[in-house]
Image (cartoon, rainbow, N blue to C red):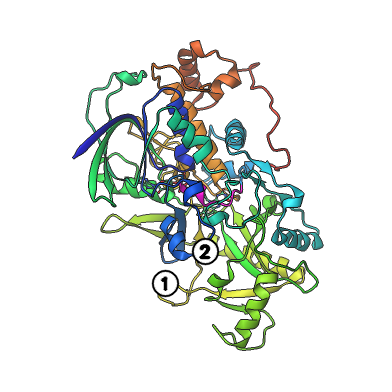
Amino acid sequence: METLHTEVLVIGSGFGAAAPALRLARSGFEVLMIEKGPEIVPARDFRQTQDPQYLLRYIKSVRGDNVNYIYAEGLGGGSGFYESVSLRAPTIAFDQRDGAGTLMWPGSLSRERMNPYYEIAERMMCVSQLDVHDIPRSGLAFARLMKRLGYSVDRVPYSVRGCVGHSFCVAGCTSGAKVTVHKPYLAPACRAGMRIITGLEARRVRILRHDEPADSRLIAEVPYRYEVQCYDAARGSSLEVKAKILILAGGTVGTARLLLNSRAALPALSGEVGKNISVNGTVKSLGILPEDSIEGDMFTGLSHPGLISYEFLSSRGITISTSKPLPVDAVSYANIVIEGERRIPSWWGEAKVDMMKLYRRRAIVLYALGLTNPTASLRLRRGGEVVPQFSMGDDFRAYYQQTLALLHSILRRGGARVAHIRIIDAQGVEYDDLHTTTAHMTGSCRMGEDPSRAVCDASGEVFHYKGMYVTDGSAIPSALAVNPYLTILANAERVGDLLKCTYHSGRSERGHAETVYERESGIVPGHRRNRLHRYIRRAGIAPPQSPGESPRKRTPAIRRQPDR
Ligand SMILES: Cc1cc2nc3c(=O)[nH]c(=O)nc-3n(C[C@H](O)[C@H](O)[C@H](O)COP(=O)(O)OP(=O)(O)OC[C@H]3O[C@@H](n4cnc5c(N)ncnc54)[C@H](O)[C@@H]3O)c2cc1C
């Protein structure tokens, strides 16, 4: 079997992988990135289609009894297929406590501490607030509905440049307007020497026993610590990679699957691997707008309708947005019953035809994201696959019913009719219990203060495994009440920044290699290592601060995004 050696191995290529890969490649480290999914060159490979065969090549899901997780596999991870909604998590998300009163996030992390990294992430992804003129019709309908009831809405920041409104963001942007990690992260990382292998899945991680100098920071002095067994399904061939620093960024599902499969070779792993997954309090409802409302094709414009309401964030811990209704061909298979419709609900027939006519021009979807407890998990099945489980306690059920009732009430008070959808499973059997589908799952290998509750520490380093870091959605320890990618990317930037301070390549830096710590504290690069290590040891992961040496005030990149 072929064996490769690299200083840094990054597993995955989405938001969580891209930031540390770029920062380390630019700092002169030898970086290898492996991606399980196929190579994607956005301009060449994306198509404007709802063809399931095309979509299912990249969009994957794992299904459990009452929860489904949806994610993308391909170079760039979810960034190729996301809707560009770029929101900072509100302060209260970082302040959440669990049932025992313990902070979910490590004590040293707060929205304030994350702000410098959010700024970097926003700059890298070209995030700016949607222009009023670009709000799609479905967004305007939502704004009008909320305004009738006296509720505020805000325009959403997006990572797009020059969007022409194809409305196929989720199939991959064919015009190049949507910013994915390819251009700002992967391309410059490759220019700085990073190698990428696609179609290669990391299957197992093994620790290599060695004697390591106590404080080896120069990467040349660090021994190869981990061996990763990889498999190329297309070729049917295996490969081993030995790495000094291992960055796990396969996503909430992928990283948990890899670590669960590696447990025998990593016996000191926390028992929390695969647990504490948040579904981001996702609750959806469908309505049919009244006749006097905005009418027209609800499918034009950006995929996401561009507006969010923070009206219920402080009172209920939720945000409310609207998403576009699913395409007509997808919904034609669903059984939708509109309130007040006296005809017998059916999967077909006259009532169904009339409903589908209304659907394209007047359907509106409201969805809430909320600060629910992370009580879902992933269990390893025979054969190495994982299956999601969600113990919906009374808390979640009450949250779900109350939130759904609020969404229904907004629709009804706004003059819309609520449409009830009977959801069926893959066998065509209707679900008889609550069922949640989300692409916002986080936390299967969460950060925390100690291994009895978490998998990695606040620096992303896996407890008991030096040099192994988690930098993707699996490290995020709570629900966020907003779409998660910007927080995942900001956190990955933070860990990448820390890694640059912790290790030294001994090679010249390629491009901008200044760390946030340096910027915040005015430390000059020549003296960086000693001073930064002192700071990091003293202040945990916090940016250096001492009385009278507070970080410079900076103007937030996006002014209108409220922090509640
Ligand atoms: C359709 C859709 C729309 C979305 N829209 C938004 C949005 O508008 N805003 C927002 O904030 N969020 C959105 N999300 C969620 C967002 O995309 C995810 O939260 C984000 O991509 C997670 O980033 P990540 O780095 O944790 O993992 P991912 O982006 O999922 O990347 C993980 C990568 O690792 C690879 N991988 C996994 N295991 C292995 C392995 N063993 N070996 C090698 N490679 C591996 C996977 O193939 C994948 O490419 C959306 C998600 C979907 C599916």
Which label's residue is closer to the chain start, 1 or 2? 2
**Residue depicted at x 54% and y 34%:** 109
On the image, which quarter does residue 195 sit in?
Answer: top left
With 27 as the anchor, is 406 left or right in this view? right
Going by the numbered disc 2, the residue's amino acid type is: Gln
**Residue depicted at x 53% and y 70%:** 330
Taking the magenta stretch, the answer to whether it contains residue 80 is yes
Q: Is mark 2 on a helix, strand or loop?
A: loop
Q: Distance between the residues labelled 1 and 2?
A: 19 Å
In the image as oriented, which residue stretches furthest toward the front? 44
Residue neighbourhood size for the residue with mark 2, other residues' Cα within 10 Å, grouped as few (<14), some (14–19), many (≥20): some
In the rendered image, the quadrant that contains the C terminus is top right
With 60 as the anchor, is 243 left or right in this view? left
Q: Where is residue 15 drawn, in percent x and y?
A: 49, 42
Q: Which mark is residue 426?
A: 1
With 29 as the anchor, is 430 left or right in this view? right
Q: What element carries label 1?
A: loop
* Vertical order, 298 against 439 (above or below): below
With 406 as the anchor, is 459 left or right in this view? left
**Residue depicted at x 46% and y 19%:** 509
Q: Where is residue 139 drawn, in percent x and y?
A: 71, 58
In the rendered image, the quadrant that contains the N terminus is top left
Kindly check if marks 1 and 2 are in contact, taking CB atoms under 8 A apart as contact.
no
Foreground pick, 117 / 129:
129
The residue labelled by disc 2 is 50
Q: Where is residue 23 drawn, in percent x and y?
A: 47, 28
Q: What stretch is highlighted in magenta?
A: 77-85
